[in-house]
């Protein structure tokens, strides 16, 4: 298992980037980061990944198996990239819930999708992934893209996702991971810590938030560890696919 950890004084602590903080303080700190970056989130995603994040998300959608009439929950759905695609796939008889704990991100996502005319089968819910406010067995598919690393108690979140999935439902976790090639890993480190924060300063006038994002990626469990965590949370047939040499991985598990 990963976070949270017990301190020498018996309290619980968690990582906020490379810093250890009391577990109860992580979420407000993460909230502050995303309040700052919400309005420029899409622009920074395109700049940081060179637009490749769209291919990562497209592959995740293909793996999801979502079809007409399904109920889909997109956790940490932010600005709505996945939810927009799922809205088209499930059709008028289906249902998509875009959930995010951060109200600034949720507002940006709602405005973006509404302005695109994506309405009718999509709902917006402010929710904590660790204690999802939905009945058991509610969804055919759950996705969480680039959000799990920001969750305080990842194990609790995975158990909560398992609870609200229908039997046979799929969970897909798209997240930055560990490069499988050492040379690429070194180049990626240099990009993350030397270039990314400077890009954040130049484009968003916010170096510290983007430094946190780089650090949070390094603190996230690697591919095999996350696979084990999903199995421990009750998922079966758990497997993952590396993309861009393991810089990103998508994990898929099924609720039995």
Image (cartoon, grey):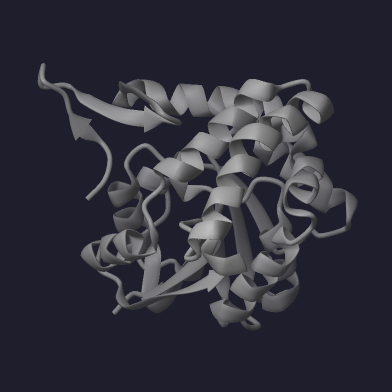
User: Residue at the spot x=48%, y=56% of the render?
Assistant: 177
Task: Let me know if residue 66 appears in the view.
Answer: no
Q: Residue furthest front?
A: 183
| Location of residue 118 in the rendering, given as x and y in whole percent from the top left corner | 81, 60
Q: Position of residue 236 (x, y in %)?
A: 29, 77
Q: How many marks?
A: 0
Asked whether residue 221 appears in the rendered view, the answer is yes
In the rendered image, which quarter contains the C terminus? bottom left
For residue 67, above or below residue 139? below
Residue at coordinates 51% horizontally, 67% vertically from top-left? 250
Compared with 3, 222 (above or below) is below
Q: Picture coordinates of residue 110 (x, y %)? A: 75, 45
Front residue (pair 2, 29): 2
**Residue pictured at 62% horizontal, 63% vertical:** 96
Viewer-proximal residue among 145 and 44: 44
Relative to 91, 153 lies left or right: left
Q: Of 159 and 23, which appears nearest the observer?
A: 23
Task: Point out residue 74 in the picture as x, y percentages from the top left corner.
Answer: 57, 58
Q: Is residue 245 left or right of residue 152?
A: right
**Residue 151: quarter of image:** top left
Q: Is residue 192 above or below residue 60?
A: above
């Amino acid at each position: 298992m990963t976070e949270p950890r017990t301190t020498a004084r018996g309290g619980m602590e968690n990582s906020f980037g490379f810093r250890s903080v009391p577990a109860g303080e992580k979420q407000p700190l993460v909230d502050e980061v995303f309040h700052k970056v919400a309005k420029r989130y899409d622009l920074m995603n395109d700049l940081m990944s060179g637009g490749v994040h769209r291919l990562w998300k497209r592959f995740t959608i293909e793996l999801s198996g979502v079809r007409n009439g399904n109920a889909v929950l997109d956790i940490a759905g932010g600005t709505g990239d996945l939810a927009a695609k799922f809205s088209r796939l499930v059709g008028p008889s289906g249902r998509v819930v875009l959930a995010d704990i951060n109200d600034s991100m949720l507002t940006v996502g709602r405005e973006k999708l509404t302005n695109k005319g994506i309405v009718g089968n999509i709902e917006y819910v402010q929710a904590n992934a660790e204690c999802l406010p939905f009945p058991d067995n509610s969804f055919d598919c759950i996705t969480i893209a680039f959000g799990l690393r920001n969750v305080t108690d990842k194990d609790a979140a995975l158990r909560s996702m398992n609870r609200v999935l229908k039997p046979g439902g799929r969970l897909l976790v798209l997240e930055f991971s560990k490069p499988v090639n050492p040379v690429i890993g070194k180049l990626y480190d240099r990009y993350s810590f030397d270039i990314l924060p400077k890009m954040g300063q130049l484009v968003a006038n916010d170096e510290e938030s983007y430094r946190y994002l780089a650090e949070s990626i390094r603190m996230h469990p690697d591919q095999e560890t996350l696979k084990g965590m999903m199995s421990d949370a009750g998922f079966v047939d758990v497997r993952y696919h590396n993309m861009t040499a393991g810089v990103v991985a998508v994990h898929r598990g099924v609720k039995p």
